Image (spheres, grey):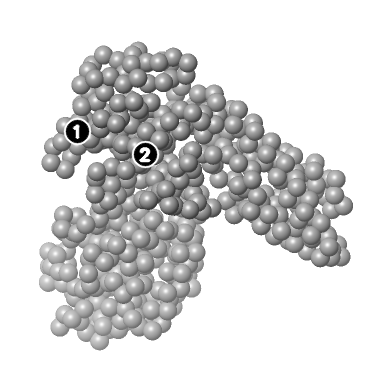
């Protein structure tokens, strides 16, 4: 069985794929071995760099054009105005890459950025500046940046028509929605997408006229082998939980993922959505590891932990002394193997609150909150969470981070990975000294399923302010002695 595929001015006949179901795993095999000879491929690294430069075009045009434009205003030195406006526009997301380019769609963001930049620039760089000066500068900023964006998008649309500047794309799912997306890509080269094929669990008769071939393999394999840079998730027969698992398996891959929302015909477009033709798309948030803010988080965490250790040195000394006096025959620090990102093991440090009978007890005993061997010092350390303070050194060393899912012992990780849905997804990021589950009371002998949900919620919604909020709530819990 073959499918006609439109590739520029000529039509190529490519083989259809036959899908074989094996329990919960879908294996895909190509029914025919003959196919059209592949044309020359641009190396993915080069393609990605070219596309990245195209997507940066609005920023580059602003940096080049705005200083000359601001020189026409009475501001004097145009550099501060340019830098301020560009930084604020970056913060509000005005330089984010889009599938559909429209300067008019960006006007609300550019207006907000222009108003803020006008006020900031006037107060900081215009001597004796007035409200009229701020309004004048904001008006000029909006006019200049709108013209700049219109010109940049015109050039970008033209560049995207070149195959070297397009992103290799696969559509996951089939039926009408997949066909609409495929046609939108074929009819709108300005989207910058090059459709490689459609990956669907169950081939449908309605797919016979689809302008793209079926592709073989599971999603992760297809992304890797076909050098896919964009994934469009249409509707599939998989359960939402299975779809979520598949998407999380691709979390660390270098590609963008867009999802067609349910009842998409009734979905209103919001500022953070994209569209392809008349189909709205939700962009799956970029995995934390691929963002600059993630690097900032890790290094800020290490610096804050080092500063906290210096500041808390007297408390650390007093606590260590109390632990030693409570039982001079046992070590002050308790060391325990824990599992962090990607299943990596490390040695977690705590102040000892009791001495386990043997190593096996420490590795497999779930909770010691009500253990009769806990003395007064141990109970105080646990209620105040002071026993966790040595983990600041783990953060400084890079074993874990300041905020993240609490790392667990290998014995329980193996158990929970099998029995608790989405528990393994917690290991997409490093373990943390504190976390969203912990500040919501999910520590000690509490629901593991709820912990996993809270931890995965944190990962999906991570941000620097979210981390700050968790740290503040952790400090509050420590001061009110809500540990355990």
Query: Residue 216's spot in the image, x, y percent?
Result: 26, 28
Q: Give the alpha-carbon distance from disc 2 to disc 1, as whole Å.
A: 23 Å
| For marks 2 and 1 on the same chain, the one whose residue lies earlier in the sequence | 1
As drawn, the label of residue 331 is none
Give the side of residue 473 with respect to residue 13, left or right: right
Q: Is residue 413 visible?
A: no
> Considering depth in this image, is 54 or 475 the residue closer to the camera?
54
Asked whether, in this view, residue 200 is left or right of residue 277, the answer is left
Q: Residue at x 28, y 42 (%)?
A: 236
Q: Position of residue 15 (x, y in %)?
A: 27, 20
**How far across and down, in percent of the image, does residue 23 sit?**
13, 41
| Residue pointed to by mark 1 | 27
Question: As displayed, is residue 67 above or below residue 381?
Answer: above
Disc 2 vs disc 1: which is toward the camera?
2
Element type at mark 2: helix
Which corner quadrant of the image does residue 4 belong to?
Answer: top left
Q: Which of 388 and 42 lies nearest the eye of the viewer?
A: 42
Residue at 19%, 33% in the rendered image: 27
* Above-or-below relation of 57 to 164: below
What element does badge 1 sit on? strand
Q: Quadrant of the N terminus?
A: top left
Q: Residues within 10 Å of mark 2 (few under 14, many from 20)?
A: some
Question: Where, by quadrant of the figure, is residue 322 drawn?
Answer: bottom left
Can you tell which quarter of the image residue 435 is in?
Answer: bottom left
Q: Nearer the viewer, residue 206 or 262?
A: 206
Residue 440 point in image, percent of width and height:
34, 73
Quadrant position of the C terminus in the picture: bottom left
- Give the labeled residue for mark 2: 177
């Amino acid at each position: 069985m073959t499918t006609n595929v439109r590739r520029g001015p000529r039509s190529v006949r490519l083989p259809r794929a036959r899908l074989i179901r094996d329990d919960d795993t879908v294996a895909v095999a190509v029914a025919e071995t003959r196919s059209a000879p592949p044309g020359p491929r641009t190396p993915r690294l080069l393609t990605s760099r070219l596309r990245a430069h195209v997507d940066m075009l609005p920023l580059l045009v602003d940096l080049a054009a705005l200083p000359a434009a601001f020189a026409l205003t009475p501001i004097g030195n145009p550099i501060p105005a340019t830098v301020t406006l560009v930084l604020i526009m970056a913060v509000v997301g005005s330089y984010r890459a889009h599938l559909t380019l429209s300067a008019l769609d960006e006007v609300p963001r550019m207006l907000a950025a222009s108003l803020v930049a006008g006020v900031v620039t006037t107060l900081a760089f215009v001597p004796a500046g007035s409200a009229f000066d701020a309004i004048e500068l904001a008006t000029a900023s909006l006019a200049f940046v709108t013209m700049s964006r219109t010109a940049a998008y015109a050039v970008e649309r033209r560049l995207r028509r070149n195959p070297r500047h397009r992103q290799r794309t696969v559509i996951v799912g089939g039926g009408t929605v997949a066909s609409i997306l495929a046609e939108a890509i074929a009819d709108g080269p300005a989207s910058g997408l090059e459709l490689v094929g459609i990956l669907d669990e169950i081939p449908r008769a309605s797919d016979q006229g689809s302008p793209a071939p079926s592709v073989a393999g599971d999603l992760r394999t297809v992304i890797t082998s076909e050098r896919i840079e964009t994934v469009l998730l249409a509707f599939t027969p998989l359960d939402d939980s299975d779809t979520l698992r598949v998407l999380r398996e691709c979390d660390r891959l270098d590609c963008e993922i867009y999802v067609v929302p349910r009842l998409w015909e009734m979905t209103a477009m919001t500022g953070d959505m994209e569209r392809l033709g008349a189909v709205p798309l939700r962009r799956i948030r970029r995995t934390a590891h691929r963002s600059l803010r993630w690097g900032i988080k890790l290094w800020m965490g290490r610096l804050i932990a080092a500063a906290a250790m210096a500041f808390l040195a007297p408390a650390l000394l007093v606590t260590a002394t109390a632990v030693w006096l409570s039982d001079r025959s046992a070590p002050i620090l308790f060391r325990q193997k824990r599992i962090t990102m990607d299943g990596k093991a490390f040695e977690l440090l705590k102040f000892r609150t009791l001495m386990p009978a043997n190593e096996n007890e420490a590795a497999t005993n779930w909770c010691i909150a009500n253990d009769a061997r806990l003395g007064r010092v141990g109970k105080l350390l646990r209620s105040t969470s002071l026993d966790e303070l040595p983990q600041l050194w783990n953060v400084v060393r890079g074993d874990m981070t300041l905020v993240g899912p609490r790392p667990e012992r290998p014995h329980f990780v193996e158990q929970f990975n099998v029995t608790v849905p989405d528990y393994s997804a917690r290991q997409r990021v490093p373990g943390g000294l504190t976390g969203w589950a912990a500040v919501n009371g999910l520590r000690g002998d509490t629901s593991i399923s709820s912990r996993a949900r809270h931890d995965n919620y944190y990962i999906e919604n991570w941000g620097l302010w979210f981390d700050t909020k968790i740290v503040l709530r952790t400090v509050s819990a420590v001061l009110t002695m809500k540990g355990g």
